[in-house]
Image (cartoon, grey):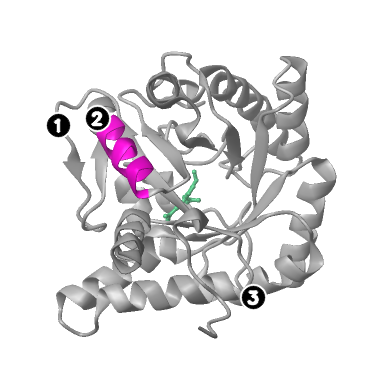
Amino acid sequence: MVAETPLRTSDLIAPLFVREAIAKPNPIGSLPGVVQHTQDSLRAEVAELIDLGVPAVILFGIPEHKDAQGSEAWNPDGVVQVALRRLRAEFGDDIVLIADLCVDEYTDHGHCGIVTPTGEVDNDATLELYMQAAVAQAEAGADIVAPSGMMDGQVFAIREALDEEEFFDTIILAYAAKYASALYGPFREAVDVTIADGGDRKGYQQDPANAREAMEEIRADLAEGADMIMVKPALAYLDIISRARMETDVPVAAYQVSGEYAMIKAADANGWLDGDAVALETLTSIKRAGSDLILTYFAKDVAGWLAEEAR
Ligand code: PBG
């Protein structure tokens, strides 16, 4: 009766993986219960999520062919564009379709942009790729594009590209405060990404030691035209979520990332803690810190539990 922070199904966004050229769903070892979907199993999963009342999904693609630029990210027949078109045709407005906008799943070197001969990511050249990907995703039916590459100026570039093609209503959810986190480990398995030459993303993602810098990133993205912002990961960055909520007036999303999910699942599998209870507790805490929306691999489970509870 006096609970201040009710976790609701309408707070949840389900991250889903869709892979090209596989005949059946492919389990992801380090994310128990999560799979790489075929186009058909993706459609079935989205139907279930809609039934449970989950309002949105965010799609990640695993292409058959990767190249230096990640060109499948803007191919109109690329795996995510096909998925968006099919889901939109099948479900209309019953689900909000979000497209993760980056090239790391599509590049053969695993970086979020164009790599120069000296191994640096070329920020400004990469913006061109993001602009093409944004338009391809909007054309395919994305309601929201979510740039996750942390290139400077990406939100402005994407907004311009979308407006140029008259996608005025396509929303930008900016991964604004995205940390260079070891908690993305299982995600790399999920999307078959190995960063070339033992590289990392510290050149473009944020230092976990910095909080003020996160607010600077958030302000920059809002000034460039972001409609919503995201903090990622979630549990280790509750202070950032809280500051973002206090210092901005747009919807704040938080991403409970692959490693957060995997830690709970692993400890549960060992009988070391009650994974379902920890999932609910941590998600409630992420909401209490100030997030309006939570991206979580527990979305379907939680929606099921909440529906059960309501009965
Ligand atoms: C980049 C992207 C990543 C995640 C979401 N978008 C990986 C990265 O930045 O290295 C991680 C999500 C997760 O760990 O669950 N396209």
Q: Residues within 10 Å of mark 1 (few under 14, many from 20)?
A: some
* Total marks in image: 3
Q: Nearer the viewer, mark 3 or mark 1?
A: 1
Nearer to me, 61 or 185: 61
Res 216 quadrant in image: bottom right
Does residue 117 appear in the picture of this structure? no
Q: Is mark 3 within 8 Å of ligand 1?
A: no
Q: Determine the secondary structure under disc 2.
A: loop
The amino acid type, in three-letter code, at marker 2 is Thr
For marks 3 and 2, the one nearer the N-term is 2
- Check if residue 45 falls in the magenta segment: yes
- Check if residue 203 falls in the magenta segment: no
For marks 3 and 1, the one nearer the N-term is 1
Disc 2 + disc 1, Cβ < 8 Å:
yes
- Where's the C terminus, which quadrant? bottom left
The residue indicated by pointer 1 is 24
Residue 209: give its label.
3
Nearer to me, 109 or 58: 58
Residue closest to the far front = 311
